Amino acid sequence: MLTLFYAPGTCALASHIVLEEVEASYKSVRVDFSNKDQEKPEYLEINPKGRVPALVTDQGIVTETPAILVFICQNANRPELSLLDDPFGFAQVQSFNSYLCSTLHVAHAHRMRGHRWVDADDTHAIEAMRSKVPETVGACFDLIERDMLKGPWVMGDAYTICDSYLFTVARWLEGDGVDPKRIPKVMDHRQRVSERAAVKRALADEQ
C-alpha cells in the first residue's frame, strides 16, 4: 500500500493524478498548511524538508515530484507513462519535469514564499520578488508554449507523466498574473487533461 501526503493546490496533485492513472492501491493523507502541519514533528519524520508531496512505500519514502512520478510508473509496471523503455525519450521526460520543478515552480514560489530567499521583514525585497512573478512565470510558460509542448501531449502523441505535471502547474498561472491568452497551446492542453477520468478522481479526492 502506498500513502501519498499532499496539500490541495500544490504540486502534489501531479502525483495524485498518476496514482489514479495507474489505478494504484494507495491512500491519501492531507497535510493542512493553514495549520502548519508540514512543520510538525510527526510530518517532519516523514519528510524532513517540510514539503509535499511525500510518498510512503514498502521500501521507504520518496520525495520530489519528478522522482515520485517515475517511481509510480515503475511500481505499477506502466513504463509507457514515463517512456522508460526509450532512453532518449525518458531523458526528455526528465528534462521537462526537471524544468517545471527547478525553474517554473521556483519562479511561482516567489509570489507567496519570498521568505525562503530573504528575511521575512524585508518588505521591499519580498514585494520586489512578488511583482516580478508575472514576468518570470510568464517567460517559463512562453518557453513551454513555443518550444517544449509538442502536442497534443507534452511528448507528442503519447500521454505521459509530463502531462499531469504541466496540468498541475498550469492551474497556478492566473494567480501568478499570467495572461492565458498568450499561451493557447498550454490552455488547450490544460483543458484536455482536465477531462481525463483519473484527473477528475484526483481533484475530487483533494476537495
Image: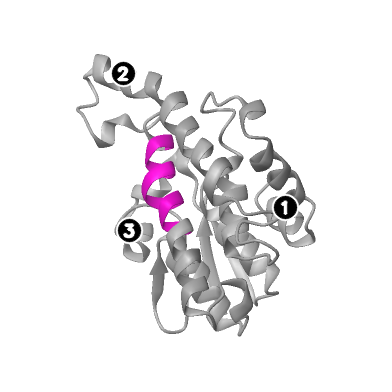
Q: Position of residue 156 (x, y in %)?
A: 65, 61
Give the magenta range: 97-108
N-terminal-most mark, 3 or 2: 3
In terms of image quadrants, where is residue 59?
A: bottom left
Return the residue at label 3.
Answer: 44
Q: Position of residue 153 (x, y in %)?
A: 67, 57
Q: Residue at x 39, y 50 (%)?
A: 38
Return the residue at label 2.
Answer: 128
Q: CA distance from mark 2 to mark 1?
A: 34 Å
Q: Amino acid at mark 1?
A: Val
Q: Amino acid at mark 3?
A: Leu
Q: CA distance from mark 1 to mark 3?
A: 33 Å
Q: Nearer the viewer, residue 35 or 152?
A: 152
Q: Residue at x 49, y 75 (%)?
A: 71
Q: CA distance from mark 3 to mark 2?
A: 31 Å
Q: Secondary structure at mark 1?
A: helix
